[in-house]
Image: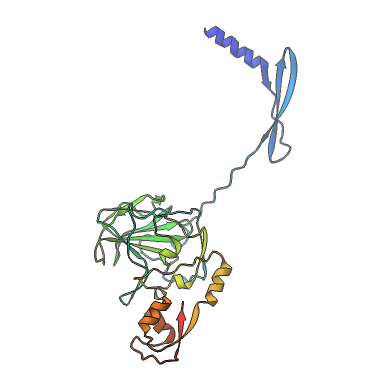
Amino acid sequence: MKYILLSAALLFCSAFSFAQQEIPQDDNSIKIKVLRSIKKAAVVDEITIPIISPKPVILADIKADHWDTTVYNPYKNENVEFPIKLQFDDSTYASPILKKKIITSRYGWRRGRAHKGIDIDLVTGDSVVSVLDGIVRFAKYSSGHGKTVVVRHFNDLETTYAHLSKISVKANDTIFKGELLGKGGNTGNSRGSHLHLNVSYKGEFIHPEYIFDFSQNNAIRAKELWVTKKWTRPVYHNSHRVSKVNVLESEEAAIASLINQRKVYIIKPGDTLSRISKRNNVSIAAICRSNAIKKNTTLRIGQKLILEL
């Protein structure tokens, strides 16, 4: 049997022989001449093989700037230029918890203080995962936040996962979207088990709901979005209410929004700071700051207030 197979192989080799590869005529293909024998007659065929160049993979060196694994916020002296441009390769993110997301407190003014993230309900021991690919920059106990993990993503955005009961990663670990970071808990300054999720860019905290849709769709609002100061200042938002999100998908739209960001409001009979705040979705603190007044200042009918929308 082995002699039959050897004879067949020799016959195949004698039937087909390949000439030396020619130099490509252009950058998009190469040509090869194939010498065949058909009934003792030599036939030369020329075959053109197209060259398909793969798209280059560009890996951002996200550890090149302000990479400090020992402090929670290494950008304290950084000045960020607005509007901020953010780009995403994905159209969806991984839910930070593996069950329905119930937000118990939103980004905004809360009990006289700035709440710079959102609180998502969970039970101690629930898994907490990374919303996007990235590298762990910080994984240790942080004052106030308790056991904390900070992941820097490949567009320089950072997400913070606070009040954990257990940390399952270490600084400099490469993390994929949906990969385990730790277990939810109640460490640090916390009034019950929950996940405190922060989103920031070079030290500027951003309203998480401006970037991520926290419904079951797990959608990123846009592949490219622009962030104005309105979405980095808690005084423009109320932690007890959903902020109206109007995503700015170009620099032109972002600049135009700045023009319409200030509104003049004329006080009417029966108006109070509380009513004006609720009707215009502006916090009382923001109204007081914009107009250099106090919460107990007496309002006059016809008085004009500047509202930072």
Q: Residue at point 36% right, 90% down?
A: 297
Q: Residue at point 41% right, 63% down?
A: 199
Along the line of sight, the residue nearer the viewer: 255 or 65: 255
18 left or right, relative to 161:
right
Query: In this rendering, is residue 5 above or below 19?
Result: above
Q: Position of residue 182 (x, y in %)?
A: 31, 53
Q: Residue at point 42% right, 64% down?
A: 209
Residue farthest front in this picture: 269
Residue 157: which quarter of the image? bottom left
Along the line of sight, the residue nearer the viewer: 77 or 98: 98
Count of numbered badges drawn on the protein: 0
Look at the image and name its color scheme.
Answer: rainbow
Q: Is residue 202 visible?
A: yes
Q: Position of residue 257 (x, y in %)?
A: 53, 73
Q: Position of residue 18 (x, y in %)?
A: 68, 23
Q: Position of residue 246 (x, y in %)?
A: 49, 67
